[in-house]
Amino acid sequence: MSVAEALRQAIREEMIRDERVFCLGEDIGIPGGFGGAFTVTLGLAEEFGRERVLDTPISEILIAGAAVGAALTGMRPIADVQYADFLFCMMDQLVNQAAKMTYMSGGMVSVPMVVRAPVGATTRGAQHAQSPEGFFTHVPGLKVVCPATAYDAKGLLKTAVRDDNPVLVFEHKLLYGAKGSRAEKSALSPVGEVPEEEYLIPFGKAALRRTGQEITVVANLLMMYRALQAAEILERESISLEVIDPRSLVPFDYAAVIHSLEKTSRLMIVEEDTRRNGWGAEVAATIADEALYLLDAPIRRVAAFDVPVPFAPVMENFVIPSVERICQEARKLMEA
């Protein structure tokens, strides 16, 4: 099952389980459409009706406002943003309203809403290529999730729907799957076994994707796969990487990273977001604060350069962390 199919299955199961769950977004249920920009909601309007799969005008402010209002009245909306870049149109509703309502009401109300947001550079230019998950890790009251496999996509999204807080689910365009009418060029096919039976994945529990002895690598979404590719290359040079996929950034599983560092003593963080003040900076600072004496070398961060994502493919590839860059930084870390 592809990640897109796993997400669709999660939404379908939650809509069957709870009639308060509904979807809203742009072009998510129009007859003959793709089922959203990346086919995740394909067929749901025919099964559940247009009262529960709502096509909205092209207005992200409207989508966010409607989701917040519906959540406050007891519904459980799943909003589709098409591109994470458009979250910036929603900032007041997400940051000033959704994230703060429970606190400001003294716990009298909750905001159980999910926002699904595709991230990642895919030769679409600077306004459709960002990875802004770090922005939202900065906001108290929001939970931030980033599934990289089909199994995680289903389990984490179902957990998000049942959470009583606003949850942002960041999905990478190159991980939806390499088949179908909306498949991206260069897309991976992280097809995995997805159980038919009910399961949930709790937030704040990282996944160990590869065991190693010398460097702990924390990498999310597409960067997790590039870290695994780098690990294969470096193994031939007798450099052993242990790769941890955080799966959720808020809450973050620091215990898993510290446990790994007790073995490796070196830490590298790989993210597609720009380096300055990214989520990797927060992880580095926390590890330096709580586990400094486990480290034998300075923490290294591999991230996109601090520039807008270029449109030209050759420049985009230069800006976004590559397998080669991860390998180079790992070699430097071993020499430090």
Image (cartoon, rainbow, N blue to C red):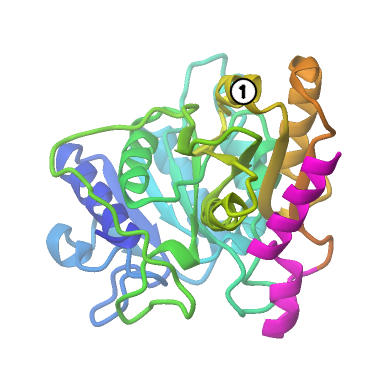
Residue 189 seen = yes
Q: Is residue 72 magenta?
A: no
Image location of residue 135, percent across then percent down: 70, 46
Image quadrant occupied by the N terminus: bottom left
Nearest to the observer: residue 94 or residue 41: 41
Image location of residue 115, percent across then percent down: 47, 49
Nearest to the observer: residue 314 or residue 261: 261
- Is 311 situated above or below 13? below
Which residue is painted at 69% across and 42% down in the image?
A: 269
Image location of residue 90, percent across then percent down: 62, 54
Which residues are drawn in magenta? 308-336
Image quadrant occupied by the C terminus: top right
CA neighbours of label 1 inside 10 A, class few (<14), some (14 to 19), many (20+): some
Q: Is residue 304 left or right of residue 250?
A: right
Amino acid found under the numbered disc labelled 1: Lys
Which residue is painted at 39% across and 27% down in the image?
A: 202
- Is 138 situated above or below 116? above
- Is 269 situated above or below 88? above
